[in-house]
């Protein structure tokens, strides 16, 4: 949805302010804003006395010199937020998933409450009322409204849409507990212990999500990062893995431009800058990758002449027998059945990542190191239950020793023949040439 104003019209490079004069039996003055592409004339009138007009003129001259003069604020909140979301945030700042979240907040919560208010009359009371109303429905919605409004009005102030950010220092109701700054909270009730991890790994071997589970619980990868992994991301000599993409919806793409079934499987950047990382591959995962590579080559060779359903040689590690990448929800039915059949806690697949993090914390790994491995932007990680590190170590060290040995790779510079058996020789030569 296009809006009636644009940023470019608001960046004047010079100005002229004329003297107060009589206008329609009252007083006023003219302002000329000079842009690179021309001039814009503004008339300020309607003052009862010459003294009032001169006072207003002096204020405006000060604002023009300070760069705080608002060219035109005679538009509604809904107009600005629509512009900010659709013409600034969507094409420049947001992933497709983030855009959906912002869109929901703007169109379903902010605009229905504040949309018909003029931007020049928007005040702290309006915003506080919105936060209070949303807090009664959902604390999470209230937090998101605050984040979106703060971001939007900060941008509005920077681009001279408003003269003051009225959202600044407006707080959520006291009923909403303030989250610790950049703290990742892990609920240990939703993670697996070491014995449950072992059961899960063993029982998942014969399922299509075995490798996905290994990547999550032994390396801490996100689900969409796992789906985006390619064999070219693996350094087979040093046994490391580069995480540098994920699969999902690409922002600003037209469905008609995407092949059927691939709209949510597009290659996109990882979640944050810190999510670009290189990880050591545990032995168990490395062996599973090589076994999966054998299947990949077998399927590719089997369909090499199949013109009806040809093999898609996209290089994805986790893929179908036709080479197609896995969808976001592919794991679900296998995952829930694994948990139920083996009396494991009914947790989310994403909680395997938290399980991995918790096990490392239990073993007294440095939080900053854990944060780097997990691809977090900050090393502040909060785990409930665990407060005394010495107690943690004493309580679980013996139990964790086998796990740590299992997931830490051995220092090997050569390939074991038993692991590479069955893989195309040309591929092996490519690996050794890396």
Image (cartoon, helix red, strand yellow):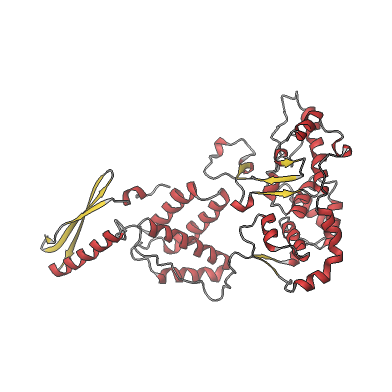
Q: Residue placed at 82% from the left, 60% from the top?
A: 344
| Above or below 11: residue 326 | above
The answer to whether residue 332 is above or below residue 325 is below
Whole-percent x and y of residue 425? 82, 29
* Mark count: 0
Q: Residue furthest right?
A: 418
Residue at the (54%, 45%) spot, across then down? 251
Left or right, 398 with reference to 4: right
Tell which of 167 and 65 is nearer to you.
Answer: 65
Pick whichever, 264 or 157, lies toward us: 157
Residue 62 x/y as whole percent: 25, 63
In this rendering, position of residue 243 left or right of residue 117 = right
Residue 56 against residue 255 in the figure, above or below = below
Q: Out of 371 and 238, give the one closest to the viewer.
A: 238
**Residue 260 in view in this figure:** yes
Percent position (x, y) of residue 48? 15, 68
**Is 321 situated above or below 117?**
above
Q: Is residue 29 left or right of residue 184?
A: left
Image quarter where the C terminus lies is: top right
Residue 19 location, x and y as percent?
14, 59
Q: Residue at x 77, y 66 (%)?
A: 362
Foreground pick, 202 / 230: 230
């Amino acid at each position: 949805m296009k809006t009636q104003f644009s940023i470019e019209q608001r960046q004047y490079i010079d100005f002229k302010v004329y003297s107060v004069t009589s206008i329609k039996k009252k007083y006023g003055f003219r302002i000329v804003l000079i842009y690179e592409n021309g001039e814009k004339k503004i008339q300020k009138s309607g003052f009862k006395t010459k003294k009032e007009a001169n006072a207003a003129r002096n204020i405006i001259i000060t604002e023009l010199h300070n760069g705080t003069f608002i060219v035109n604020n005679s538009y509604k909140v809904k107009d600005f937020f629509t512009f900010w979301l659709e013409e600034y945030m969507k094409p420049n700042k947001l992933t497709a998933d983030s855009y959906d979240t912002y869109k929901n907040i703007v169109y379903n919560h902010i605009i229905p409450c504040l949309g018909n208010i003029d931007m020049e009359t928007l005040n702290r009371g309006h915003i506080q009322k919105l936060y209070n109303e949303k807090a009664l429905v959902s604390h999470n919605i209230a937090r998101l409204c605050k984040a979106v409004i703060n971001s939007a009005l900060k941008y509005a102030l920077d681009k001279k849409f408003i003269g003051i950010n009225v959202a600044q220092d407006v707080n959520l109701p006291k009923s909403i507990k303030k989250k610790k700054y950049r703290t990742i909270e892990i609920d240990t009730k939703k993670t697996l212990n070491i014995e449950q991890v072992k059961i899960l790994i063993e029982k998942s071997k014969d399922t299509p999500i075995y490798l996905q589970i290994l990547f999550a619980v032994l390396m801490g990868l996100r689900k969409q990062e796992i789906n985006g992994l390619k064999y070219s991301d693996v350094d087979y000599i040093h046994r490391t893995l580069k995480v540098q993409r994920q699969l999902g919806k690409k922002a600003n793409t037209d469905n008609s431009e995407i092949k059927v079934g691939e709209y949510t499987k597009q290659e996109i950047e990882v979640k944050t800058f810190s999510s670009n990382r290189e990880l050591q591959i545990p032995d168990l995962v490395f062996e599973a990758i090589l076994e999966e590579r054998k299947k990949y080559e077998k399927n590719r060779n089997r369909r090499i002449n199949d013109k009806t359903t040809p093999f898609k040689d996209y290089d994805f590690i986790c893929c179908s027998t036709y080479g197609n990448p896995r969808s976001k929800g592919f794991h679900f039915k296998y995952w829930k059945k694994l948990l139920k059949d083996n009396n494991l806690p009914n947790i989310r697949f994403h909680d395997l990542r938290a399980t991995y993090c918790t096990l490392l914390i239990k073993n007294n790994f440095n939080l900053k190191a854990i944060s780097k491995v997990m691809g977090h932007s900050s090393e502040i990680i909060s785990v409930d239950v665990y407060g005394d590190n010495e107690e943690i170590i004493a309580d679980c060290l013996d139990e964790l020793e086998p796990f740590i040995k299992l997931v830490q790779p051995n220092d090997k510079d050569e390939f074991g023949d038993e692991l590479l058996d069955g893989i195309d020789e040309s591929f092996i030569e490519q690996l050794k040439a890396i």
